[in-house]
Amino acid sequence: MIAHFHAKAIKSIRGASLKACYNSTTSKAISFAEEHGGVACSTIEELLSRPDVDVVCVCTPSGAHLEPAVAAANAKKHVVVEKPLEISLKRCDAIIEACIQNHVQLCAIFPSRFSPANLALKQAIDEGRFGRLTLGDTYVKWWRSQEYYDSGAWRGTWALDGGGAYMNQAIHNVDLLYWLMGDVDTVSGITSTLAHDRIEVEDVGVATLKFKNGALGVIEATTSAWPGLLKRTEIHGTTGSAIIEQDQITLWNFAKPKAKDAALLEKYGKNSAISGGASDPKAISFQNHAEQLKDFIAAIKTGRTPKVTGAEGRKSVEMILAIYQSAWSGKQVQLPLAKDPRRPAKK
């Protein structure tokens, strides 16, 4: 599904074009090429051997990112990997190392960082407008039907989904929270499966955090909140508070207002009818994907580091794995993790 958003994003970028695609189901590759352009390759080796392919976007199920990403790096192609980078730290590290060894660029897709409202929030934090950061919360209260999970054998499995509401849906906001608030020191989490059948992973979870700067935080994630609410991020400090709801500013209040605040609220504070995937995973825009791919192309051309590196993508996976470890053990977990947590044996 997400490959179609990449294709639309690529088409919108001047100087970029989709040259080829590969899918393990050949008919799907042919259909994709007919819709978006490029050549449908019968093998991944055929795609990677093409001299006109400079960048490979990996849009496979989460737990199947490693193999095509490493193959692309070994073929000296720059690599874009959809979220999450992978479903374990070991597999994330293998992708990162392959790109380092082959001297190619790597980025993990987190388009929420490129939303104008989130960029304005990040700038306000960097400018010190919040004073001392005290609380950072994020909420992803979405709805996914049973049919959604039944639509793909990989959905809701540990082996290929890597987790549930946290790893698949809320990971964008997990990434946003540490990007805004800074690295996390400790995590406590609790998860459950309450609204869906035939899935191994959680469809609801609550986690509390302590950041390295001393601030506290909460991450709530669910796919069991009908009909699906807009995702929300709240940042609070001693001299300011702000709330972003699905890329719209709903609160922007500082002890020392600035002249630009009114214009910011006028531009990004209007109500939006876009669900942002709250109940339909296809109800998202490709625009922020395009902005991230533009940044990646610029990084390749200039030799600079992309704004979201593989190492940055690894952090959100580590935080989610820490939440899972805490939920499984009933104990607070310290970051960084020494190794991948092991799921408890089924009773």
Image: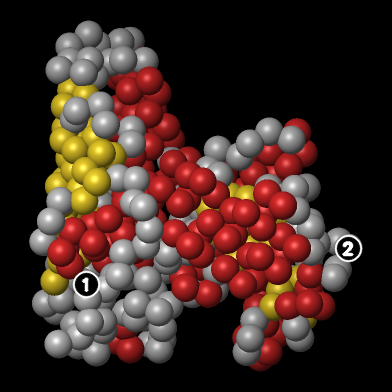
Q: Residue 266: tell me if it is visible.
A: no
Residue that badge 2 annotates: 51
Task: Determine whether the residue tagged by mark 2 lies in a helix, strand or loop.
Answer: loop
Residue 300's quadrant in the figure?
Answer: top right
Point out the residue furthest to the right here.
51
Q: Earlier in the sequence, mark 1 or mark 2?
A: 2
Location of residue 305 in the rendering, given as x and y in whole percent from the top left corner:
63, 36
Residue that badge 1 annotates: 202
Q: Which residue is drawn at 40% across and 89% down?
A: 153
**126 lies left or right of 165:** right
Residue 132's quadrant in the figure?
Answer: top left
**118 lies left or right of 223:** right
**127 lies left or right of 312:** left
Q: Tell me which amino acid carries mark 1.
A: Glu
Q: Residue 47: tell me if it is visible.
A: yes
Q: Tell me which amino acid carries mark 2.
A: Pro
